[in-house]
Amino acid sequence: MPHNLPSPLGGDAPDEAPLSRAPLERVVMQVRFSSVLRIEQRDGIAVFQDQVRANYPLFEQITAQQLRIDLAGGPPGVPQVITTTAWQFEDAGRTLRLTLGAESATFEALKYEGRSDFLARWIEILARLQAIYSPGLSVRTGARYINRFHGEALAQLTELVKPNFVGVAQPELREHVSHALSEAALKVDEGHAMLRWGILEAGSTIDPNLLEQISVPSWILDIDVFAQEQTAFDVARLAETFEGLATRAYALFRYAMNDSALSYFGSAT
């Protein structure tokens, strides 16, 4: 829906320029939906596994425990241990990963082949999810793109990245900056965006599940675009939603970059 927000928060995004050496470390898309308890059961996941096995043959059960304390209506009760089960599917090269639980599906790429390829794979998964389980509602959708510069790219940061996103990591200060992260919560046409950018010291990370630690300093740009809206779980609508989220994330990425970044990372245009 139109909000008349200024670019890059609203309006059209630049055409995608494929990068042969893109700084992307991970791309994540997720939909949260109303509970489908059958997904947690081994016999409930079997049909889904049969349909995705050709593309994602590696399969693993993930079990987690959480403490829940009921604070309503009186003094705290005895903590309850809640066990949840999710299922993880990966391709043979372990570059694509799907995690499916009773209330969410998450698709991750460690090797990103471009927006159209990734979205096509994700929408195919959502179509199978709808056909097999018919989740009643979609309650949250999100797309996250985590970029990292290190080595030569970090040395050329001021040439590749606009000044607002460099901050205290100016060349004359950089060797003295071990950690400096900034954060911005934004409204966008598609809902909301959370940006985080700045310097990470060697061996540190924003989230060990999303960004591996490396032995040298780096600069990151973490773009998370999401919509919190309760609607019918419909694949056609979700396809439009995720296309919009991915496009907005790209608009934000291009906004943070100087034009020289495209050629540096291998754009043919």
Image: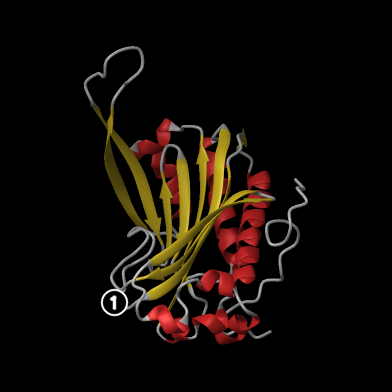
Residue 104 rendering spot, x and y as whole percentages: 46, 42
Q: Position of residue 55 (x, y in %)?
A: 46, 61
Q: Up-down: is 76 above or below 13? A: above
Q: Residue at x 28, y 77 (%)?
A: 215
**Which residue is at the front of the view, 223 or 89?**
223
What is the image's colouring?
secondary structure
Q: Is residue 174 left or right of residue 140?
A: left
Q: Compared to 62, does 9 lie above or below? A: below
Residue that lies at the very extreme toward the left in this rendered image: 78
For residue 146, side relative to residue 200 (left or right): right
238 sits left or right of 218 in the view: right
Q: Along the horizontal axis of the image, is 39 left or right of 163?
A: left
- Under tag 1, what secondary structure? loop
As drawn, which residue projects farthest toward the top?
73
Residue at the location (65% across, 59% down)? 248
The residue lying at 43 percent from left, 63 percent from top is: 181
Which corner quadrant holds the N terminus?
top right
In the rendered image, the quadrant that contains the C terminus is bottom right
Residue denoted by label 1: 215
In percent of width and height, residue 177 lies at 36, 74
Number of residues whose C-alpha sits closer than 10 Å to that of mark 1, classed few (under 14), some (14–19) or many (20 or more): few
- Residue 20 seen anywhere in this rendered image of the structure: no
